[in-house]
Every structure is written in structure tokens, then in C-alpha cells.
Amino acid sequence: MSTQAPEKHSFQAEVKQVLDIVVNSLYTDKEIFVRELVSNASDALEKLRHTQLTEKDIKDDNLELEINITTDDAAGTLTIQDFGIGMTRDELIGNIGTIAHSGSKAFLEAIKESGGANENLIGQFGVGFYSVFMVAEKVDVFTHTWHTGGEGFLWSSDGSGEYIIEPSAGQRRGTKIVIKLKEEHKEFSQEARIKGILERYSSFIEFPVNLNGEKVNTTQAVWLKSKSDVTEEEYKEFYKFQAKASDEPMDWMHFAADAPLSINALLYFPGHNPEMPGFGRIDCGVALHCRKVLIDPEPKKLFPEWMRFLKGVVDSADLPLNISRESMQDSALIAKLSQVLTKRLIKHLADMAKKDEEKYNQIWKTFGNYLKEGVAADFTHREGLAPLLRFESSMTEAGKTTGLQAYVDRMKEDQKEIYFITGPNRQTIESGPYLEGFKSRGIEVLFCIDPIDDFVLGNLSQFQEKQLVSAEQDDLELGESNEVPEGEALDDASTEGLCTWLKETLGERVKEVSAGKRLVDSPVLALNADKMMTANMRRMMAAMQSSGESNEPMPIAVNLQINTRHPLIKNLAAMKDSNAETAKLVAEQVLDNSLIAAGLLDDPRQMVNRLNDLLEKVTKA
Ligand SMILES: Nc1ncnc2c1ncn2[C@@H]1O[C@H](COP(=O)(O)OP(=O)(O)OP(=O)(O)O)[C@@H](O)[C@H]1O
């Protein structure tokens, strides 16, 4: 028997804030608290089942692993009891008096950012239990931990700011939550109301759920059934239950195999991207089971990092039941599981891309960034993932994409490389000078509009033994143009003279100046002299540096190609001898124009002053 007296505690400041939001504004749909508490009860039973595998001194070991719910509309109460793991006094304080999860702060910020109520947030940040205070006048939590040596406690609160904890003798193992309902929410003490909710939310709970002594769920593991026995509705409902989601899944993959491993997997593509910008990486949301017993709800090594957006369940009868989460991390079995499932998922996507392009495009729009991350970082599956990449290109309509395979299929026989151009959007790429040399030769170019695209293609480096090459690169062999260029070109001597003069005049700012074959309409083109770094990589590195201590612009090395048919270049060739002072200003300006088109001009101030000088000269006449 304990000698501890009732103790009053204050909720942690953050809990008070969370409570305030949860109670006053978060949910319009009050009934969600039932789902939260029943799911906590189920988690507690799951933990107990796991503990039973390794521990001996389990209190009330003969108790059924079940959830008992009772309603009492005369008293206006609802009681949810499980014979699960229970809580010690410290666990009570740690789990439901404070928010131990670092998620609490993120939750509060997410609420602020999203501008208020958002039901998706609650599951993600683990404030589930507190939802009970939307409907409760008072909540009593009676609990006894699983260990025979432990004690029973009562935790009690009206949710306003404080709670009490006192010893409570005669408790059975597990947790019993007695909810005294607010007058206006008495409906939740009616059996019919609760039954309706349980039928919707609890049908997938792995333990019997009894309402006033009658079982309401049909204990079933959807992932172990054969595909033909599961309806579309069941798949969707199971997703909502498993991922604690309120949206519908975009797609799912239900897969069973006996060799090389026994695997049953049900993997979902959520209805939206679960990773919110600014909130860091999410953890893997696919739970690992062994013959229906939960081994780990968020196994770290089950999948490569880029697959973290998936939800669902993997069950393998080959896993030892008592495998610990730690030893699981290094298990060869897990590595094998991971390999089989990852390959299978990639195949699922490849099949979808072939059979249902529209659906695949939707998946690509929402989860494409994860697949790109896979290509960039997952060496093992890079080759499998590469055909799944999608880009706009010079041969697609705006907003439509193409894959690398389709690009290769369209390539002309003499084209050896796959080309890509980086830019902030399609319009900028199309109006820039880089594309014209490709267009005039009928060569397709992929548009890298997402800042990480050229990094991804750089890492992939080749597709079907064809090099992936940035169109900014200087030494491209594009072959002869199909278009007959207009106008006379400068003769060789004048061209050489102009190139030498430009190099002297522009000094360190250019590495080489030459007459280029790529240009059709533009006077000059700045080409990347640095093979290792595209202009976009340079921009990204500059952005990283400017957020650090150094603000020095990164050195630029460009090779300048001139279009010897362009009137501006021809005029300049003459002007350098007749009016050297103005010609120098024009040369500098022409270089800056090409750097702007390349996205390489760091500081436009000098250019603005020079333009003013030039305008002054023009307006004088
Ligand atoms: N019936 C229960 N038995 C044992 N422990 C419980 C029970 N209900 C809650 N807890 C403990 O309280 C913690 C907090 O519960 P809460 O519902 O607020 O968040 P959570 O369940 O961790 O997160 P989420 O709701 O996102 O799953 C749980 O992690 C668990 O440790």
C-alpha cells in the first residue's frame, strides 16, 4: 500500500496552450476524441503484448487483451478501459502532464502558421489525449502499470490548468479513463452515438472492442487478406485508421510474397505530402509487424530515407517476434525486407507510369521530390528510379512532362548526349540564349525548373549509357544547324581581331572569347567554363554562403561566345576602332547581358551606372 498523498500539479505551460487551442478552436468534429482514446488503448495493449514476450512478472496475466467501453447516460459518463501496459506515477506525469514530445512546440507553431484549425495537425504532433477536454467536464484516469511490483494511481483534471495524482488501490492492470461529460456534450454517454463512432473508427483495431459488453469490431488484419477480399472502401478506411489521416490515399500497393521472405505489405501514398515545409523531416510512417504483432510503429531502417512519405504496414512472419528495436537496425533480415519492398514499390510506380499516366503524374507532382532525392542519394536504387523522373522539355507543352526513356526514344541517331537547361521557369529558359542552338538543330532539351533538378541529374550522370550534360557547358558538339542563318558573318580576320580585343577589354571577367556556332538570334552567350559546377549550383552555394559569415561573391569563370552574324557584334567590330571609349562600355554591357541570361550577375549596381553613361551618350546626338 502506498503512503503517497494526493498531489496537485500544474500543467506545463505548453500543455496549457495546447489545451486551450484543442478545446476552443481545433476541432469542429468533437467525436474525434473517441478515436484518439481508443487508439491509445490499442497502443497500450500492443505494448503489453510485446512486453509479455520478454518479461515474466506481468500483473493480471490472465486478463484478456481487450478494450471495454461503457456508457452511462444517467450519470453522463463515458468510460474507456484497456488491460494494456498501464502507467507508473512518473509515466503519468511525463505522458499526460507535460508534452515530452518536441512536437508540442512545432504543433503550436504549425497552428499559428496554418492560421488556425487544422485537423491533420493533431495526429502528427501527438496531442491526442488532450482532445478529450473538448467534451469533458472532468477526466479521471485510473491506471496500474504492467509490473506486479507497481502501484495503481488516479490522475484527475478538469483540463483548466491543474491535475492531481493520488494512489488508488485495487486497480487492475491497464488504464481506465472515466469521462464526465459537459452538459452540452452528453450525447457521448449514449450507447447508439458511441456505437456509430466505433463502427467508423475502430473496425481495424487488432483487439476486441466491447461496448457495454458487446463486441463492436471485427478484428481483422487487412494486410494479411488477399486483394480480392478487400474492398476499395476498406482500403481507404484502413489508411485513415493507420495513418491517423482525414484525407483519402492517392494510391496503394498491396503485396504478398513467400520467397525469398514471407512478406505481406500494404503501402499507401497519402492524399497530400506529409512533410510540411519548415518542419523538418518526417519519420517513416510504415509500421513493422510480425504475424500481426506490432514490432515497431516507425522502424528506422525498414526503407531508404526517400520512402519516408509512405504510410501503411509491413508484416513478415520471418522476423523473430522478440527482435528488439535496436538489434533490428542492423538486422540482415531487415535489409533484405527493405530491398525486396523498395524494388517492388519502384516496379509498382513504373507499371503505373506505363498504364495510367494521369495517375502517375499526380503521384509525381506530390511525391516527385522524394523520388528525386532517391536518385541523388540512394545509389542502390538509382538506376531503377531514373526512369521515373519527369521534366518539362523543349518538346513538351507547358505544364506537361516527359521521362528520360521517352527522351531517348526521340533522340536522333547522331545525338550522343542528353541535354538539360536550368532556369527559374519555362518562360525564362525559352527566352534565354541557351536554347536557340539546340532548337535550330532539332535537339530536345530537358528543363530543370526545380532548383534541385540539375543536382539530381548531375548525380545520375548518365541514362542508358548516355551522358547527361548541362546546356550551359562550353564544349558541346551539337553538329550542324538545320536553319540557314540570316545575314553575312564577319570575316575571319575581323572576328579574330574582335575576339582578341574583347578578351583584352574584359580582362579577368572572361576566360576565353570565341565565335560560336550555337547562337541564332542573340548576340552573345556566356558559357560555363567550370565543368564541375552549373550556374544553378553556384547560385545555391552563394545562397548558403550568404546565410553564413562570408558574403564574398563566388568567382565566375565564363567563356564568351559571339554571334558574328548579329548586327550588334558587327557594329562593335567597327566601333572598337572608330570610338574605343563607347565600344568598351558596349562590350562590358554585352557581357553583363549574357551573365543576366545565365543567372550569373551578382551585383547589378555597376551595370546600372554604365547603362546611364551609355544612355547619356545616345541622347546627346
Ligand atoms: N490508455 C493508455 N495506456 C497507457 N498509456 C497511455 C494511454 N493513453 C495515453 N498514454 C500515454 O500518454 C501518451 C500521450 O498520449 P497522447 O494521445 O496525448 O499522444 P500519443 O498517443 O503519444 O500521440 P498520438 O495521439 O499522435 O498517437 C502516450 O504516448 C502514452 O505513453
Image (tube, rainbow, N blue to C red):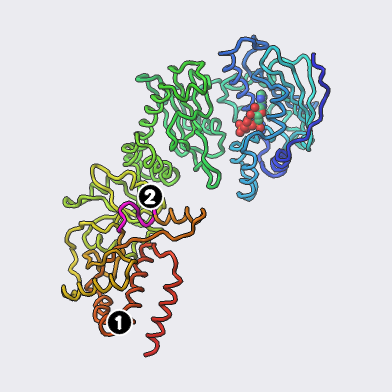
Q: Residues within 10 Å of mark 1 (few under 14, many from 20)?
A: few
- In this view of the protein, which residue sits in the foreground, 228 or 48? 48
Residue behind mark 1: 580
Q: Earlier in the sequence, mark 1 or mark 2?
A: 2
Q: Secondary structure at mark 2?
A: helix
Ligand 1, by image quadrant, is: top right
- In this view of the protein, which residue sits in the foreground, 31 or 286? 286
Q: Residues within 10 Å of mark 2 (few under 14, many from 20)?
A: many
Q: Which mark is residue 263?
A: none
Quadrant (top left/top right/bottom left/bottom right) for the C terminus = bottom left
Residue behind mark 2: 453
Magenta residues span 529-537
Amino acid beneath label 1 = Ala
Q: Secondary structure at mark 1?
A: helix
Quadrant (top left/top right/bottom left/bottom right) for the N terminus = top right
Which circle, 1 or 2, is nearer the viewer?
1
The spot of residue 281 in percent (x, y) is 51, 40
- In this view of the protein, which residue sits in the foreground, 151 or 19? 151
Amino acid beneath label 2 = Asp
Farthest bottom residue? Answer: 621
Mark 2: C-beta under 8 Å from nearest atom of ligand 1: no
